Image (cartoon, grey):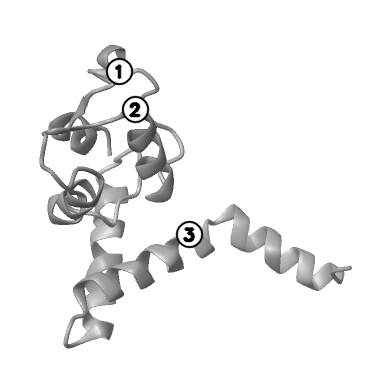
Amino acid sequence: MATPREQEAADYLRKHKIIELMDNLTSMLFFHRPERPNEFLITQLEQLRASKMRSLDCQSLFNDTNLDAVLGILDPTNQGHITFVQYKEALTTLGIEKFNECPEGVAKDKISHETFKREA
């Protein structure tokens, strides 16, 4: 059983989504493998802060290159679309909690790359 102090710490991490932030930053480090990781992390955090200052609805540490890499994994034959299940799983894996449950192409179970990137 957690002590009150441990529970307080866990609640703080959950409230501020610190674990998700650290997971995203770590993933980006492994993906990009920058020569200067500290500078890279600072840049990523500055971009996150700038996006929050512009009042964007969601925090995003991913750019088009990152999303293209995800699509390359989900659509290795480059058909130009992914399934709705892949769309949902990918967005959830990226830490996006609120997303369009009826994106363009859902009726045919073919979510285009462009739609996925726009929604992400």
Q: In the rendering, which numbered label is found on residue 68?
A: none
Q: Report x, y in % for residue 114.
A: 13, 32
The residue wearing badge 2 is 84
* Nearer-N-terminus badge (3/1): 3
The residue wearing badge 3 is 20
Viewport quadrant of the C terminus: top left
In the figure, 74 relative to 109: above or below?
below
Q: Residue at 85% across / 68% down in the picture?
A: 4
- Give, as a three-letter code, the residue at label 2: Phe
Helix, strand or loop status at disc 2:
helix
Q: Report x, y in % for residue 106.
A: 30, 18
- Give, as a three-letter code, the residue at label 3: Glu
Left or right placement of residue 84 versus residue 6 in this view: left
Helix, strand or loop status at disc 3:
helix
Badge 3 crowding class, 10 Å Cα cut-off, few under 14, some 14 to 19, many 20 or more, is: some
Marks 1,2: beta carbons within 8 A:
yes
* Nearer-N-terminus badge (3/2): 3
Q: Residue at 32% across / 49% down in the picture?
A: 52
The residue wearing badge 1 is 106
Q: Residue at 41% across / 40% down in the picture?
A: 89
Q: Report x, y in % for residue 23.
A: 44, 66
* Nearer-N-terminus badge (1/2): 2
Viewport quadrant of the N terminus: bottom right
- Give, as a three-letter code, the residue at label 1: Val
Badge 1 crowding class, 10 Å Cα cut-off, few under 14, some 14 to 19, many 20 or more, is: some
User: Marks 3 and 2, Cα distance to the nearest angstrom?
Assistant: 24 Å
Q: Residue at 23% across / 18% down in the picture?
A: 105
Question: Residue 109 versus residue 32: which sits nearer the camera?
Answer: 109
Comparing labels 3 and 2, the label whose residue is closer to the camera: 2
Marks 3,2: beta carbons within 8 A:
no
Quarter assignment of residue 107: top left
